Image (spheres, rainbow, N blue to C red):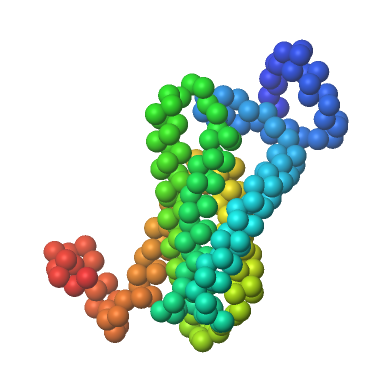
Amino acid sequence: MTKNYLEIPEELYNKLSDYAENDQLSIRLENQQILLENPKINHTNKQNLALHYFIVPSLASGIIALLIFLSTNHPQIAFTGSRHLSVASLIIILSTLFGFFGFIWTYLRKSCDLSKSKFKIFRETLTLSVAYTSISFAVQIIFWYIIGKTFSGVTFDPFTAGFLVLVFVGIIFYFLISAALSVTLPNLILLLFTTFIGGILVSMATNNQKDWWQHNFSFLGTGEATQHW
């Protein structure tokens, strides 16, 4: 393997001397800038930052959920699927709201590129926030649908229900914040393919027509395909 050498200013070299001699630094090009970083430290900082950010929204969601459950005057709160407010529905609502605004705030703090206009930064941030929270919302719908079928009729007292909301919202918010801190082009491409393939699989699994795939696949690429989907 050919070794290539890169000349750096002496001032930068002195700053890099703070690292141990055995540490390997990674170099990458992002937003027309060359970034030099320690992968181990960078990964740890992202995890700590995500943990730090998710505490307040989790506690807030737990308190809000507890107040809502107590205000309903119902001794037992349904885990999923109910005419009244359930634990699952409140988790979906709160995690989507907190996750959307949390993603925007975190991404804006993470990517301060002065070369971009404010409008471009806002458009990029809003688009990514809508995309990630929409995917989170869809995944939760599927997850709680399965849980509802598995644990049908399960109920909890308001305090336990509020605690469950706190835990699940915290988990979802953590993953959204982690995603905001690690948005890169390869991750976005992977997300695109995952969403595309996942959407196809979900639509296939939820199709009500019996053995629809045995008939419809034979019409793919023909003019009759529009009449058989």
Q: Quadrant of residue 164?
A: bottom right
Could you tell me residue 157's position as x and y percent? 61, 79
Q: Is residue 154 left or right of residue 55?
A: left
Compared with 53, 5 (above or below) is above
Residue found 50% across the figure and 46% down from its top: 101
| Quadrant holding the N terminus | top right
Q: Does the image show residue 143? A: no
Q: Nearer the viewer, residue 168 or 216?
A: 168
- Taking the view exactly as shown, the residue that stands out farthest to the top is 10
Residue found 24% across the figure and 74% down from its top: 216
Residue found 58% across the figure and 35% down from its top: 110
Q: Quadrant of residue 46?
A: top right
Compared with 100, 81 (above or below) is below
Please count the marks in the image.
Answer: 0
Compared with 31, 176 (above or below) is below
Q: Is residue 208 left or right of residue 100?
A: left
- Taking the view exactly as shown, the residue that stands out farthest to the bottom is 153
Could you tell me residue 128's position as x and y percent? 45, 44
